Every structure is written in structure tokens, then in C-alpha cells.
Image (tube, grey):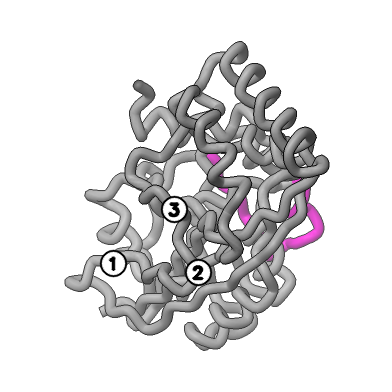
């Protein structure tokens, strides 16, 4: 079995596909982030794991100075290209745990679908160290949620996921509803929770585009090419045969905001 530390390197193998296929974060999420933290133009932000810059760009457009640390070299190169017009952005290649950063220098540290990959023994401690007094940590996640109508695709496709051992062993038999999502757990010795919000999103996928999305997930990327091909082919055929070639996929983007103590 591929360990957690190794899995976080897999995204770099599909950097271009990751940029094209991953769902974008809604504008309302960034508005809520800015309102919660009361940051203003010129504030210094640190992003952990920007990927290809999908959460970086909306905040760069607001005029914030952003330092972004990306583990994957190919992902970082795409982010640099996508953000080439913004002089207020610096992309650093490397691991957040290993990059030296000045203490008490950032107004906000944020991580979009990446904070869970950071070493648990360091992520809150180092974040606390680099934040200014009363600075904030914002954790953004993308959740697969129930479509509230019976989740037919989820139920029909599960035998395929099970057969290839791609089912999340920690997930309940049914997808959660958006209202059931909870704030990220934080280290209450270092931070206090000040806001949690959910942002439901529905995206229509063709069979091909949904398979492209599946090709950006770490457990799929860690499989052999033969297993990937067979799995993706079965899912694509299922969508064509049972769902007229397209599905509506429901996500909920969550925003957890905490203040440095």
C-alpha cells in the first residue's frame, strides 16, 4: 500500500490534467474568507500547496502579496505560468515543512485542498509561528456530497470502485449532505475557530470529463497504468450506458477560519 507521504507526490504526475479537471472554488468563498479575516490590499499571505494556482489567482486579483509553497515541480511551473501577470506572487518549490520562513510575517496562511497532506506534528505549530499576532489560518476543502435525490450514480458505481480497491475505507456507506459537514479540527492550544461555511456546487460532467477528474486523485494516480486504464474505461462505459453520457456531480467547498492565539 502506498503511504500518505508518498501519495502527496502523485499529483505532480498529472499536473496539466489537475489544472484542467479539478473543480474551481466559488467567488463567494473568497468573499467570506476576506470578510472573516478582515484582510485588506497589501496584506501578506502564505499559501500552502497552491497546486496550479486555482485558489491563488482570485486572491492575487485582490492585490494581496502572496508567497505560495508548492511541493510538485510541474504543478509549480503551471502556477507560475498562470500567475505570470501578477507581480505580487512568489511561487517557491519545496515542502512547507522544510522551507525556512520568517516568524510572525504573514497576516493569513491558507491552504486549499492541501492542509491534510502536511505533517500533522508540524502543520499547526509552523503555521502559528509564521503568522503575525491575531493572524489567521484558512483551510479550504472540496467534499463529495449527496445529490439529495438518491445518489444513483454513487450507488451504481460503487461496485466498480470496490473491485479496484478505490473505495475510501473511512467513508460511510452514503455520501454526506452539505449540512452535515463540520469545521476542520484545529489545535485549540494555538488557534480559536472564528468561522465555518459551506459552499455547495453542482458540476455537469461528460463521461470523458468525469474520468479526467478521477485521474487527478492520489489513490488513482498511485495505481499502475493498466489498472487506471481498466478502471477509467469501466466508469466511462457506465456513464454512457446508464446515464446518457453525463452526470451531475455535487460538491461542497468548506471554509474553516481560525485566529492565532
Q: Residues within 10 Å of mark 2 (few under 14, many from 20)?
A: many
Q: Residue at x 62, y 59 (%)?
A: 250
Q: How many marks?
A: 3
The boundaries of the magenta stretch are 81-93
For the question of whether residue 259 can be seen, the reply is yes
Mark 3 or mark 2, which is nearer to you? 3
The question of residue 84 being in magenta is answered with: yes
**Along the line of sight, which residue is nearer the eye, 199 or 81?**
199
Across and down, in percent, residue 204 comes to: 76, 54
Residue 120 shown left or right of residue 166 in the figure: left
**Mark carried by residue 178:** 2
Q: Which residue is mark 1?
A: 186
How far, Cα to Cα, is label 1 from label 3? 26 Å
How far, Cα to Cα, is label 1 from label 2? 20 Å
Mark 1 or mark 3, which is nearer to you? 3
- Say which element carries label 1: loop
Q: Name the residue furthest left.
A: 189
Q: Which residue is mark 3?
A: 174
**Along the line of sight, which residue is nearer the eye, 2 or 45?**
2
Quarter of the image holding residue 1? top left
Q: Name the residue furthest top.
A: 226
Amino acid at each position: 500500500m502506498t503511504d500518505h507521504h508518498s501519495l502527496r507526490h502523485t499529483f505532480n504526475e498529472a499536473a496539466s490534467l489537475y489544472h484542467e479537471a479539478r473543480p474551481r472554488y466559488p467567488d463567494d468563498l473568497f468573499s467570506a474568507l476576506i470578510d472573516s479575516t478582515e484582510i485588506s490590499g497589501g496584506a501578506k499571505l502564505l499559501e500552502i500547496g497552491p497546486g496550479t494556482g486555482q485558489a491563488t489567482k482570485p486572491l492575487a486579483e485582490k492585490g494581496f502579496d502572496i508567497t505560495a509553497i508548492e511541493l510538485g515541480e510541474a504543478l509549480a511551473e503551471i502556477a507560475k505560468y498562470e500567475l505570470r501577470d501578477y507581480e505580487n506572487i512568489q511561487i517557491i518549490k519545496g515542502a512547507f515543512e522544510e522551507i525556512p520562513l520568517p516568524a510572525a510575517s504573514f497576516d493569513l496562511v491558507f491552504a486549499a485542498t492541501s492542509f491534510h497532506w502536511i505533517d500533522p506534528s508540524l502543520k499547526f505549530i509552523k503555521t502559528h509561528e509564521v503568522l503575525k499576532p491575531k493572524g489567521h489560518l484558512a483551510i479550504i476543502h472540496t467534499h463529495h456530497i449527496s445529490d439529495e435525490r438518491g445518489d444513483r450514480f454513487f450507488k451504481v458505481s460503487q461496485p466498480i470502485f470496490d473491485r479496484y480497491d478505490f473505495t475510501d475505507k473511512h467513508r460511510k456507506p452514503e455520501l454526506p449532505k452539505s449540512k452535515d459537514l463540520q469545521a476542520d479540527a484545529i489545535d485549540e492550544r494555538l488557534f480559536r475557530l472564528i468561522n465555518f461555511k459551506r459552499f455547495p456546487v453542482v458540476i455537469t460532467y461528460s463521461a470523458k470529463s468525469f474520468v479526467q477528474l478521477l485521474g487527478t486523485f492520489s489513490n488513482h494516480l498511485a495505481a499502475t497504468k493498466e489498472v487506471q486504464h481498466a478502471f477509467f474505461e469501466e466508469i466511462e462505459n457506465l456513464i454512457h450506458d446508464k446515464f446518457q453520457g453525463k452526470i451531475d456531480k455535487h460538491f461542497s467547498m468548506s471554509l474553516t477560519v481560525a485566529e492565532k492565539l
